[in-house]
Amino acid sequence: MDMGTDLGGSIDDALVSARQALGALLERHEVGNPTLGADLATLLGERMSGLRSLAARLGALEEMGLRLTGERNPDTMLSVFLQAAGAILDADCMAVCLLDSGEQRVRHLGVLGVARDVLSETALERERLPGCLLDQPLALRVQGQAALPAGHPPVDAFLGLAIRDRNQLYGWMYCTRGSGAEPFSHEDERIGVTLGAQLAVAYENLCLYEVVQRHAAQLQLEAAARQQADRALHDSEQRLRLSARILESTQESIMMTDANADIIAVNPAFEQITGYSEASVLGRNPRLLRSGRHDGAFYRAIWASLTSTGQWRGEIWNRRKNGQVYPERISINAVRGASGEVDAYVSVSSDISALKAAHHQVDFLSNHDPLTLLPNRSVLTERMQQAIASARHGDRQIALLLFNIDRLQRINDSLGHEAGDALLREVARRAGLLAGPADSLAHLGSDEFVLLLTECLDSDAIIVAVRRLIDEIAQPFHAGGHELIVTTSVGISIYPRDGANPSELLKAADVALSHMKDAGRNGFRFFKGEMNAHALRWMALETHLRRAIERNELSLHYQPQVSLADGRICSMEALLRWSSPELGQVGPGDFIALAEDTGLILPIGNWVIRQACLQNKAWQDAGLAPLRVAVNVSAHQFTAGTVPAVVREALRESGLAPQYLEIELTESVMMRDSEAAEVQLAELTGMGVSISLDDFGTGYSSLGYLSRFMLDKLKIDQSFVRNIITDPRSAAIAQATIALAHGLSLSVVAEGVETQEQLAFLQRIGCDEVQGYLFSRPLAADAMATLMASGARLALPAPADTLSPSLPASLPASPKE
């Protein structure tokens, strides 16, 4: 098809048509006719409009041809063609079918204005439209309804044709116009043929491009295959070189034999491990390495595995050239040729003697203490179970001695942990000398040891063994140029009396050891049932005490302090009480020490200070006479360094004036960290808070502390007041204390006053205040408020001029009398 010839013919036809129309017009009109000019103008306008429309269509054809020429995607090509052709031919619907190279199968089906499914089944049917277009030599124009498949939009004009060139049928195309549209003209037919020719050329070019692409891809694949083959050859050569290097440098022993199991090659590692050179073993059988530890059945099993599976793996004991037997982990594989017959055997083995030694060391360390090399807890438990099982069948008893070194931490702190470790090793050695053949000594960690005695006939034998242990450990020990003498504490439990299993016996011995330490160390204790009951009660108390604050189980009671000048209440002491729903009323002697030991004294002590301030301020706000309230503060609170901050916050929150708060402390506060205590006491005094020293005379270096610390009051401990009438020494201490306090401008309070005789004596020797059951027990807050409001007084005795002012009436005035 020649697109230029067809388009030129269309333009020539248009010009010829215009000349013929002009001649006909001239024949119909005479010259000089006045309408002739208008008719000529109209005719020329119509013909020029037709020429301009044809030129626009030719421009659209040219633009479409350029786009189709460069398109390499068939779907995009069809989309471009359908849009352009539909616009050129002013079509409502358009479809294009392109076949494969065999002209038997639809390769591409493009549609515009019609559904693809409507045409897909009839695209190749030669008896009906549109498939019959494939057999049409010329374009087909139909005016009116065309026999298109069901579902096709209505058609009043149809133009279709086959897409072909001289040698190839490429497919078909058609376009339609809907109801009321003008029929396709001869000019539309020519343009349609031109469009088909352009699509044929573009499709042919696309097919040729795809063929070229496939050939190019095939060439690339072949080139890549050649490159891969070259690389494989190079890699194979490289692997051969690496294999040779590996064979020479590997640490595993490699031995190759022929099919008769005669050695044909070994590597340097074989020579190093076995001591045999390659030259000395070539042609020989590997049995030259036999250690003698395996029987014939072992080697027959190896050959049976090689015969059936072609391989064997396992551990074997072999013998070096020097006669040393060593373990190996070995893998033997049969090498078969192309015929399937065994051509050779290859063994790869590793000397695992070092590994087995390491495993043995790991096993030992997992069951022994690395410092003392004694058995650890797991081994001890196993031996205890064995001893218990043996003891069940006889009349023997088992004794468990749990002991540790008293104050080992002092040695670590002063001489270093190296000295402490050396001491532990020496203790292990000395205790080991006392253990019998059937006994077991273990180190549980830190400074805790266990000696298990399995042949104890009675308690006397156990006591003898324990004393020997204590005496042996107490022998002098030298470390770092120092001679050390240490003591040990021992807790003893006995099977079956104190436990039926290792866990129970260890727990019982631990309880006994704790009691020994509480009693002063350097001795031993047998376990008793009441020890465990005490420990269990202690644990229960701790559990409940931790929840006491949040459950509002704690409360404060207040005991009045009475002035001996007029018998009136001058101050009070806040005393902590605990009422537990589960345990009942728990005495302070039971839980205060527990709170200090567990650290709970800090939150509890802070709560006591805050609660005492709030209550005292509430009494004052209620109109009661303002009194000072004294609060006991633990040494642990002073050690924490938070007492001034807690007091300041309690005063701020409650609004209580500082002069109505008194802090009571014991001498242990000053003994722990006197400088830190002095700083905190100075800060409290600066706030205006009073400071009193409780339990005076029961501590250490009391007089020295009196001269250093800023105090306002001394309290004589009730242990002196209790015997003040019957014991001259207690009376003398009380009198000296009062004289000393007054000399330092301190007031004195005597605690625990219960009788009129005690009161009279304290009044005679100049005591300032008293506190005790004689006037009032500790009272709850509401009862204390009632007492304060009542104005109650303590009945003071009349002056007794006949009695000595310094000693009780029932005792001589001096030791000489």
Image (cartoon, rainbow, N blue to C red):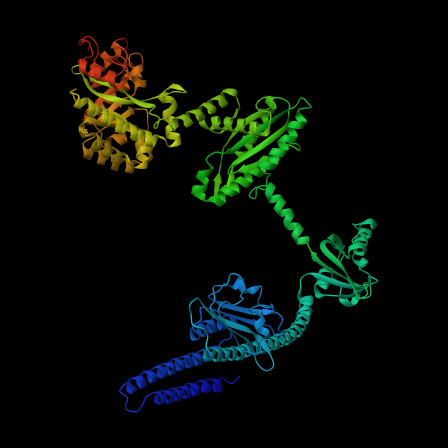
* Front-lying residue, 792 or 200: 200
Residue 150 in view in this figure: yes
In the shown orientation, is residue 640 left or right of residue 106? left
User: Residue 565: percent from the left, percent from the top?
Assistant: 16, 16
| Percent x, y of residue 669 | 31, 31
Residue 701 appears anywhere in the view: no
Q: Nearer the viewer, residue 498 or 57?
A: 57
Q: Indicate whether 413 appears above or below 333.
A: above
Tell whether 571 sits left or right of 284: left
| Location of residue 219 by image quarter | bottom right
Image-based side of 145 in relation to 801, left or right:
right
Figure disc tally: 0
Q: Name the image quarter holding residue 722.
A: top left
In terms of depth relative to the viewer, which is nearer, 224 or 19?
A: 19
Residue 403: x %, y % from top left: 53, 32
Residue at figure coordinates x 49%, y 43% from the top left: 419
Comparing 37 with 393, the one in front is 37
The C terminus lies in quadrant: top left
